[in-house]
Amino acid sequence: MLIREMTAEDLDAVAGMESENFTTPWKKDDFDDLLDCDDRGCMVAEEEGEIVGCVVYHDILGDVDITNVQVKEAFRGRSIGRKLMEAALEKARSVGGKEFTLEVRASNKAAISLYESLGFVEEGKRKNFYSDPVEDAIIMWLR
């Protein structure tokens, strides 16, 4: 498996995966906007030419917001999410990222466990943050 920065050639695959994984998915244009931004990035996981995961981050003066983490369902349980997160953290740190935050659905125990294993800790909640279905978000930080 290869972890690398997203390119324009990956946009259809990433947007398609987004539609499969989320009830309120980002659009292709949302991912396309990441290609020309110095303060944002997207890393993809590629296996045998297929995009199987991605992570999106946004650096705001050293505070890095992890805005999107996903792995295709058939590829889950193979540490792809961990490898994507480690690559994003490393890349963001290399350009000045110091602290990292993210929101996660309160019911997403697998993701919460991954983030905790990377050193993230819960620091708050956002009531009814998610829709379809409505659910609280847990706010986590890695400082």
Image (spheres, rainbow, N blue to C red):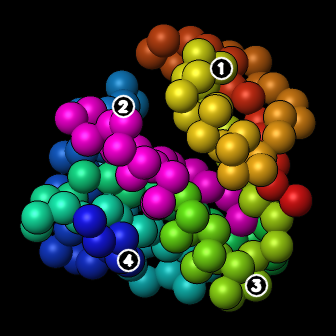
The three-letter code of the residue at mark 4 reads Glu
Picture residue at 43% right of the left edge, 83% below the top: 36
Quarter of the picture containing the N terminus is bottom left
**Dot 2: few (<14), some (14–19), or many (≥20) neighbours within 10 Å?**
few
Which marked residue is nearer to the observer: mark 2 or mark 1?
1
Q: Does dot 1 land on a helix, a strand or a loop? A: loop
Picture residue at 57% right of the left edge, 51% below the top: 67
Q: Nearer the viewer, residue 114 or 56?
A: 114
Residue 131's disc number: none
Can you see residue 28? no
The three-letter code of the residue at mark 1 reads Ala
Tally the marks.
Answer: 4
Can you see residue 71? yes
Instruction: Give the percent coordinates (x, y) of residue 133.
Output: 48, 12
Instruction: Give the percent coordinates (x, y) of residue 123.
Output: 89, 36
Location of mark 2 (residue): 22
Apparent side of residue 99 relative to residue 84 in the rendered image (left or right)? right
Q: Does dot 4 land on a helix, a strand or a loop? A: strand
Which marked residue is nearer to the observer: mark 4 or mark 2?
4
Q: CA distance from mark 1 to mark 4?
A: 29 Å
Location of mark 3 (residue): 96
Location of mark 4 (residue): 5
Q: CA distance from mark 2 to mark 1?
A: 15 Å
**Dot 1: few (<14), some (14–19), or many (≥20) neighbours within 10 Å?**
some
Stretch of the chain drawn in magenta: 64-84
**Dot 4: few (<14), some (14–19), or many (≥20) neighbours within 10 Å?**
some
**Dot 3: few (<14), some (14–19), or many (≥20) neighbours within 10 Å?**
some
